[in-house]
Image: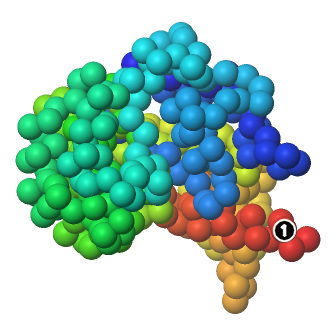
């Protein structure tokens, strides 16, 4: 499957949620779709799932615009952060309803996963805890067997054991039934080793798209005395910079280029730290 966003923008009244997004994703692959709150992630995923339309541009799957294309949308499962199920329906009824929408639905696997997550099919959605609702969403995503399966914050309310079960299932499914998984999560440290490719949105724009190996060469932390750090980062794009106790730390896009390392230290930047720096950058900009 090939997803392409071509000059995609989305506005809500006077707010620009997305601005001129251009990207291409090819699967099967596990994608980490990341960004701070309000970066535009969920808006983009709603566009990809055909739930809303773009203001400008288009999102295509295998060359076809997804909006109002039922034959494409039946092969895209979007498990949103909330609102996936009707409160008055039972778990069994919810899964049955989804089986009509997804032609490749695996009912046997869905029933197996009900036991894995200890869910009673007779229970109504409104009686479930947040973790149980998340588990039901996870079951739906895996049992859909769609070529593109999207999980947007899929495990709210799940404990560590439940989240680890999700990660194990994700790896297992990618081996046994490869597809394009898109995972949006704030628990980046837990999930980062799963990602084969990373996309980061920031302020409605695509900031970065790299595979997991390229990431480590693309973003670096430069530390040392301010004078030497300023010299080293001259000409590089700066993500974040701060000074404390006569030491400066600068996070820069190295883009694979060599940086003079005399009198400075170069360190890798984790995905989690990258999002923290972007959040700090955002707050600093809003306070100016």
In the rendered view of the protein, which quadrant contains the N terminus? top left
Does 266 appear above or below 57? below
User: In what element is the residue under mark 1?
Assistant: helix
Does 64 appear above or below 274? above
Q: Residue at x 50, y 23 (%)?
A: 3
Q: Residues within 10 Å of mark 1 (few under 14, many from 20)?
A: few
Tell which residue pokes out farthest to the top in this image: 63
Is residue 227 something one can see in this rendering? no
- Name the one closer to the observer, 243 or 3: 3
- Name the one closer to the observer, 61 or 269: 61
Task: Pinpoint residue 229: horizontal percent, then vertical percent.
Answer: 71, 66
Tell which residue pokes out farthest to the front in this image: 88
Does 263 appear above or below 109? below
Q: Residue at x 79, y 41 (%)?
A: 11
Q: Residue at x 85, y 46 (%)?
A: 13
Position of 270 with respect to 264 (left or right) is left
- Name the one closer to the observer, 189 or 61: 61
In the rendered view of the protein, which quadrant contains the C terminus? bottom right
Residue 163: which quarter of the image?
A: bottom left
Q: Which residue in the structure is indicated by mark 1? A: 286
Residue 143: which quarter of the image?
A: top left
Task: Pinpoint residue 244: horizontal percent, then vertical percent.
Answer: 70, 85
Is residue 62 something one can see in this rendering? yes
Task: Pinpoint residue 38: horizontal percent, then vertical percent.
Answer: 67, 57
Task: Pinpoint residue 212: horizontal percent, then vertical percent.
Answer: 41, 43
Residue 283: which quarter of the image?
A: bottom right
């Amino acid at each position: 499957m090939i997803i392409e966003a071509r000059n995609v923008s989305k506005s809500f009244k006077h707010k620009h949620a997305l601005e001129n997004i251009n990207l291409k994703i090819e699967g099967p692959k596990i994608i980490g779709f990341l960004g701070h709150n309000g970066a535009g992630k969920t808006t983009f995923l709603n566009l990809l799932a055909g739930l809303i339309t773009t203001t400008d541009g288009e999102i295509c799957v295998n060359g076809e615009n997804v909006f109002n294309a039922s034959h494409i949308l039946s092969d895209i499962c979007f498990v949103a952060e909330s609102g996936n199920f009707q409160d008055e329906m039972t778990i069994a009824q919810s899964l049955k309803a989804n089986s009509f929408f997804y032609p490749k639905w695996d009912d046997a696997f869905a029933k197996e996963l009900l036991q894995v997550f200890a869910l009673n099919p007779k229970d109504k959605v409104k009686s479930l805890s947040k973790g149980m609702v998340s588990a039901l969403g996870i079951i739906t995503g895996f049992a859909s067997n769609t070529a593109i399966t999207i999980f947007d914050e899929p495990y709210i309310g799940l404990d560590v054991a439940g989240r680890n079960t999700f990660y194990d299932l994700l790896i297992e499914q990618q081996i046994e039934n490869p597809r394009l998984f898109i995972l949006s999560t704030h628990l980046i440290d837990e999930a980062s080793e799963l990602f084969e490719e990373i996309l980061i949105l920031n302020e409605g724009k695509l900031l970065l798209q790299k595979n997991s190996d390229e990431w480590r060469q693309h973003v670096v932390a430069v530390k040392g005395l301010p004078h030497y750090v300023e010299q080293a980062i001259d000409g590089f794009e700066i993500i974040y910079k701060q000074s404390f106790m006569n030491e400066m730390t600068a996070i820069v896009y190295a883009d694979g280029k060599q940086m003079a390392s005399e009198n400075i230290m170069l360190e890798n930047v984790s995905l989690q730290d990258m999002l923290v720096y972007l959040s700090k950058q955002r707050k600093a900009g809003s306070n100016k």
